[in-house]
């Protein structure tokens, strides 16, 4: 099994060297960068499993570097920050950061944060693949596609929203989504208000 590859980016050479040595001593493979643009370039080329980014770096800040690494190469990030960076840390968290540590960095603290971030990253990937699989199954079923299409047109919502609302209702009534879709698509007299029932349920569910 290949060692976990980690990109470390910091404009402080002492911190960069210390973190790199500590990680390699723990068996990680490391890549290093001294600024945000280099971090993005190296990350997109080498595809590390995780990026450890200083929030304040020359060129582009770590938050923007993390955004580009995520969007262009699917690489998750954690951040190194100073105490004065609290607002930036909050912004980084909103952007999807999987963790952060305040300087000075102790390798003994960094390793658990890395392990937790890698585990969380894998969980996110699994959920994403599951969602893609479910969406594909829904689209491949004509009955569900028809019901969703009618729902979208009736309530002027997106496909994603329509799927979420019908799925939530099906779970609530302990029924398969396909069964609900059949009733919606067939529009038997006793089901004429099913669309509105689903819609009203979701509104209450969201409160």
Image (cartoon, rainbow, N blue to C red):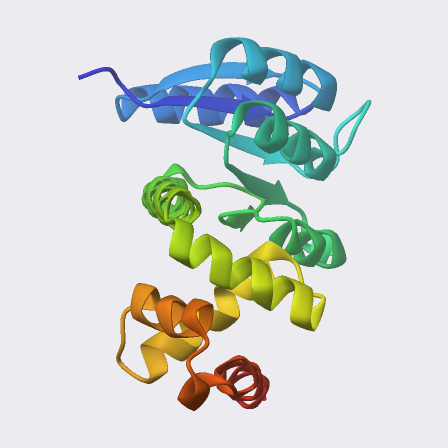
Q: Residue at x 54, y 48 (%)?
A: 100
User: Where 107 falls versus 86 (above or below)?
Assistant: above
Quadrant containing the C terminus is bottom right
Q: Nearer the viewer, residue 36 or 169?
A: 169
Most distant residue in the top direction: 45
Q: Residue at x 36, y 75 (%)?
A: 170
Most distant residue in the right direction: 59
Determine which quarter of the picture holds residue 178: bottom left
Q: Nearer the viewer, residue 172 or 90?
A: 172
Q: Residue at x 76, y 33 (%)?
A: 61
Q: Residue at x 32, y 42 (%)?
A: 115
User: Where 185 falls versus 193 (above or below)?
Assistant: above
Q: Nearer the viewer, residue 127 or 202?
A: 202
Percent position of residue 88, x then y: 73, 52
Q: Nearer the viewer, residue 150 or 61?
A: 150
Left or right, 154 with reference to 19: right
- How many labels sit on residues? 0
Left or right, 61 with reference to 175: right
Left or right, 87 with reference to 194: right
Quadrant containing the N terminus is top left
Percent position of residue 2, x then y: 24, 15
Percent position of residue 94, x then y: 65, 56
User: Where 158 falls versus 120 (above or below)?
Assistant: below
Most distant residue in the left direction: 1
């Amino acid at each position: 099994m290949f060692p976990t590859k980690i990109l470390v980016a910091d404009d402080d050479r002492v911190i960069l060297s210390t973190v790199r040595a500590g990680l390699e001593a723990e068996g990680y493979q490391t890549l290093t960068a001294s600024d945000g643009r280099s971090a993005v370039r190296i990350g997109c080329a080498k595809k590390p499993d995780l990026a450890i980014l200083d929030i304040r770096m020359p060129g582009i800040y770590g938050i923007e570097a993390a955004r580009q690494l995520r969007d262009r190469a699917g690489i998750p990030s954690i951040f190194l920050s100073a105490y004065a960076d609290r607002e930036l840390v909050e912004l980084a968290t909103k952007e999807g950061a999987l963790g952060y540590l305040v300087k000075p960095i102790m390798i003994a603290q960094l390793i658990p944060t890395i392990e937790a971030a890698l585990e969380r990253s894998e969980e996110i990937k699994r959920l994403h693949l599951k969602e893609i699989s479910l969406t594909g199954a829904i689209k491949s079923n004509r009955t569900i596609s028809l019901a969703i299409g009618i729902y979208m047109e009736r309530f002027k919502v997106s496909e994603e929203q329509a799927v979420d609302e019908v799925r939530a209702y099906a779970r609530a009534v302990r029924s398969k989504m396909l069964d609900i879709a059949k009733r919606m698509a067939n529009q038997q007299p006793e089901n004429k208000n099913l669309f509105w029932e689903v819609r009203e349920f979701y509104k209450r569910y969201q409160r």
